[in-house]
Amino acid sequence: MLLNKAGQTVDEKNVTAVLEAAGVKADSAKVKSLIAALDGVDVEKVIAESSVVSASAPAAASTEAAAPAAAAAAPKKEEAPVADASAGLAGLF
């Protein structure tokens, strides 16, 4: 993605250069595999499609964040003693 955004060709030489600039020893077999997997892939299209998916994630997070507030506002129920719960489970065995 970095290479694509920089307008560079996504090839073995450039991917290796990015990895080495990040302090990673590039495994040539893995780099070749990555380049082969990206052959024919429209990187811009994939980024655009993944942006749509990730754009919905904050909405889900905000819903999850609201759940604890709703739970705090709800009246609290008394919890059953632990001994009663385990006694009911004993009948299963």
Image (cartoon, rainbow, N blue to C red):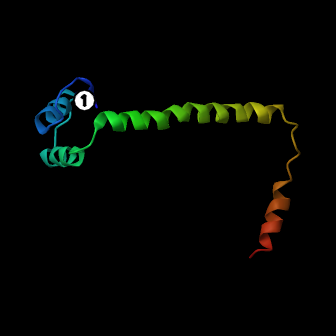
Q: Is residue 38 above or below residue 86?
A: above
Extreme-top residue of the structure: 6
Q: Is residue 66 left or right of residue 87?
A: left
Tally of marks: 1
Residue at screen point 28% across, 32% down: 1
Figure quadrant of the C terminus: bottom right
Disc 1, SS: helix
| Residue 34, horizontal then vertical, whole percent | 21, 45
Residue 12, quarter of the rendered image:
top left
| Residue 70, horizontal then vertical, whole percent | 78, 33
Residue linked to disc 1: 4
Residue at screen point 23% across, 23% down: 6
Residue at screen point 18% across, 44% down: 35
| Residue 73, horizontal then vertical, whole percent | 83, 31
Q: Which amino acid lies under the numbered mark 1 shown in the image of this protein?
A: Asn
Front one among 52 and 90: 52
Extreme-bottom residue of the structure: 93
Residue 14, quarter of the rendered image:
top left
Residue 47, quarter of the rendered image:
top left
Q: Is residue 71 left or right of residue 77?
A: left
Front one among 20 and 85: 20
Badge 1 crowding class, 10 Å Cα cut-off, few under 14, some 14 to 19, many 20 or more, is few
Q: Is residue 40 above or below residue 18?
A: below
Q: Is residue 32 left or right of residue 50?
A: left
| Residue 68, horizontal then vertical, whole percent | 72, 34
Residue at screen point 10% across, 35% down: 13
